[in-house]
Amino acid sequence: MSNAIANWWRSQQFKSALKRGNTQVAIKLLQEIKKSGAKFSWLEKLFRDKLQLENSSQQDKREVANLSFKLTEALQQQENLNEVAFDKQDSFILKPEAEFINFISKAFKLIEHDVTKLQSTGLDERIFDDFEARLVEYIKEEFSRIPDNKLKIKIEHALEDIYSLKNGQDPDYRFSLTPHVYFMKYFLENVYCVYLAWFLIYKAGLLPTKINILDIAAGPGTVAYGLALFLQSTSGFFDIPQMHISYYSLEKQDAFQFRGLQFWRRYIESRKTPVNAYFRFVTDDIFTWNTESSNIPKEFFDFITVSHCFFNTSVKSLQANNIYKEIFATRLKPQGYVLLVIQDKKLFKAYDAYQVEDQKQEKKVVNKFLAELGLELVWYKYLTSTGSRTPYSAVEFAKFAQANLPKQLYMSSMIQKYLGQKYQSCYTLDDYVILAKKS
């Protein structure tokens, strides 16, 4: 974390400690601010002077009382300033532009079948074709460094781990080529989905130009890639103000984080107008999460995201949801949002329900899911390739995909060569994108 961001965060925590009356925490933070070499704010100077008088051998109770009053008054002024800043926050929001929204709707062939069901059978070819081609180049270079006999064995191990999902098990994602196999099998589709999630947030007028994101179980940074590609799509439509993205990756496997950052530097940072993103990597298992020992800042994030990291077994699911709930409660800003992306089958299976064309049942399942996470609904969309909530058979969907969905023009040959797939891969969707706030 840069010194400027660290000091800003300490100042925010200092004010929060004063409001809660937690003097010991405030003292500790004041010491950290002093040690960093940063200048004290007016509020911090008042608190320092009050402490000095209280500890003086010739204590002036009247002066202490006067400083206490000034400190309370200063805190109230800070709260008033915060309210004014919140009222003016629209100036820091990307204003939805009708022409751009219309372009995305046409490029992705979006059809709003009802208030919560959104079908997509297209994409922005300018962005995704180049992104996919560069990803294939990266993987080929990585594979070229490994002897053929070893490469085959490593890919088999990674595939066996990832394909455990089909048997209702949760992968470990621990093998050396697991990130690469993930890139080949799931990354493009997941970025495609998250891209649309950020588009919906932008369309709703909720995307800030300065944004702090905590991505839980981040993998290679799918959420950051989805946002970066979305911002690239705005080129030629309007000049966006300078974006500043603080992206925290909370991920168990450092190999995912490393490969994600490696490709980011090769692709995203090579653009003519690269995204101004600050990365912070926290390599930790969420199942060992401890809110007191964690160095992830409290009440700091505008968005906390969980994309496709919900578990199959009821025990792990319950444990994970309780940890997510604790993170949302302590790390999200009071006015922040939680973005959840979960596959349709996984969402309904958790509640022994079947997905049918019943919006009341659907909303009931979504609200039950959010209640377990200590959240309340802002809105949700079911993103679907087919336009139907009722699942297609595998054969029906394969025919539909080949006839209607955008093809993975460059990745398909890689998957066929190394993973033995017989058909051409497409960009598909079957996910719930849910925006929520703390209850």
Image (cartoon, rainbow, N blue to C red):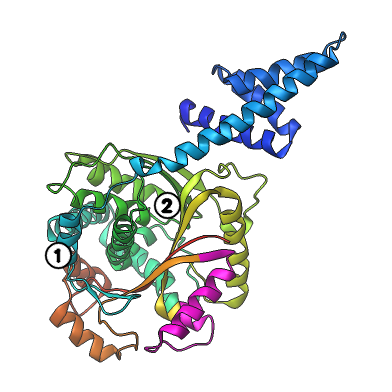
Check disc 2 and report its element: helix, strand or loop. helix
- From mark 2 to mark 1, how far is it between C-alphas? 34 Å
The residue to which callout 1 is attached is: 107
Left or right of 249: which side holds 118?
A: left
Residue 329 is tagged as: none
Q: Which is more toward the observer, 421 or 156?
A: 421
**Outermost residue to the right:** 57
Q: Is residue 28 above or below residue 294?
A: above
Q: In the image, is 430 to the left or to the right of 348?
A: left
Crowding at mark 2 (Cα within 10 Å: few <14, some 14-19, many 20+): many
Which three-letter amino acid code belongs to the residue tagged 2?
Answer: Ala
Residue at the (49%, 83%) spot, across then down: 349
x then y, percent, for residue 150 = 33, 61
Question: In percent of the image, x 47 and y 77: which residue is there?
Answer: 347
Q: Which residues are magenta?
A: 347-376
* Contact? badges 2 and 1 (CB < 8 Å): no
Residue 328 drawn in magenta: no
Tag 1: residue type? Ala
- Residue 365 is covered by the magenta coloring: yes
Q: Position of residue 321 (x, y in %)?
A: 58, 66
Q: Position of residue 256 (x, y in %)?
A: 41, 54
Helix, strand or loop under label 1? helix
> What residue is pinned by disc 2?
255
Res 15 seen here: yes
Quadrant (top left, top right, bottom left, bottom right) of the C terminus: bottom right
**Closer mark to the observer between disc 2 and disc 1:** 1
Closer to the chain start, of discs 2 and 1, is 1
